[in-house]
Amino acid sequence: MSYNVKYEDIGLKDYKETWDYQAAIFKELVDKKREGESLNKTGENYKPGTLIFVEHPHVYTLGKSGSENNLLIDFIQMQANGAKFYKIDRGGDITYHGPGQIVGYPIFDLEIIKIGLKQYIFRLEEIIIKTINEFGLKGSRLEGGTGVWLDPEINGKARKVCAIGVKASKYVTMHGFALNVNTDLTYFNYINPCGFSDKGVTSLEKELGKKQDINKVKNIIRKRFTDIFDIEWTKIAS
C-alpha cells in the first residue's frame, strides 16, 4: 500500500519559522490520533504525510540528549559569525544547518507505513546512502551513531556527510536529516558535531572537488523516498 505524501520545497527559510511550520503539521496529525479519529488511508480524516525540503541560514541546534559543552564558542562569537542557536526536541546532540545543505523534514505516520522508529531511521540512512552512491561515494553507518558516514571504520578518516535526528509521538515523526552538499564546513569547527570530538564532517562538494547541483541532489533524494517508503506524491509545491 502506497503512502500518500505532500512535498514542499520552501527554499531558504529561518529555522524557527520552519520549526513552527512543521510542528503545526505534526500537531495536527498527532491530535487527530489522540482524539481517536480514524487515519485510515481511505477515511475522511486521513491526513497525508508531508516531506519538507529547506535550506536554513546559519544555525546550531542542540537535541534534548545533547550537551551545550559541544558548542565550542560563546554566544557573542556565534552572533559575530551570523549564526543562531536553538535547543530543540529531537534526538541527537548538536549540529549545524546552513546554506548549501539539504535539510529534510518528513512528517510521516509510521503506524500507516507499519514500521517502528528504529526501522524508520534505518530507511532515512538508506535513502542518503543510495543518493550519494549515484555520485560515486560509498556511504556507511557508524555503530553507536546515527547518520551517514564515509570511511567510518578507518581511525582518523571517519567523516559524516549527513546528520539525522528525529522526534516521534503517536508514531508521527518530525525533524529529519541534513545532507551537506555545498555547505560551508568551517561552521562545524565551532562544535563537536553530533557530540563527536574525534570525527570529521564532509560534503559532496568537498569529496567531489566542485560545487554540486543541489536541485539534482534533491530530485535523487525524492526518488529514493519513493522507492524506499513506497510513496505516492499527492501534491508538489515549490
Image (cartoon, rainbow, N blue to C red):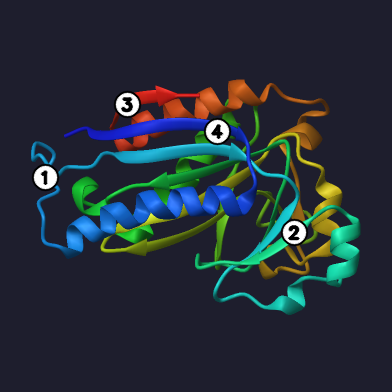
Q: CA distance from mark 1 to mark 2?
A: 40 Å
> Residue 55 location, x and y as percent?
64, 39
> Which quadrant holds the N terminus?
top left
**Which amino acid, mark 2?**
Lys
Residue 3 position within the rendered picture, expressed as x and y whole percent measured from the top left: 24, 36
Front one among 204 and 184 = 184
- Provide the residue designation for mark 4: 10
Precedes in sequence: disc 2 or disc 3:
2
Disc 2 on helix, strand or loop?
strand
Rendered image: mark on residue 40: 1
The residue at which mark 3 appears reads as: 233
Above or below, 220 relative to 158: above
Which residue is located at x 50 percent, y 24 percent?
A: 238
The Cα–Cα distance between marks 3 and 4, rounded to whole angstroms, is: 16 Å
Give the number of the disc on residue 84: 2
Query: Is any atom of residue 142 visible in this view?
Result: no
**Callout 3, which amino acid?**
Trp
Task: Assign a secondary structure to mark 1.
Answer: loop
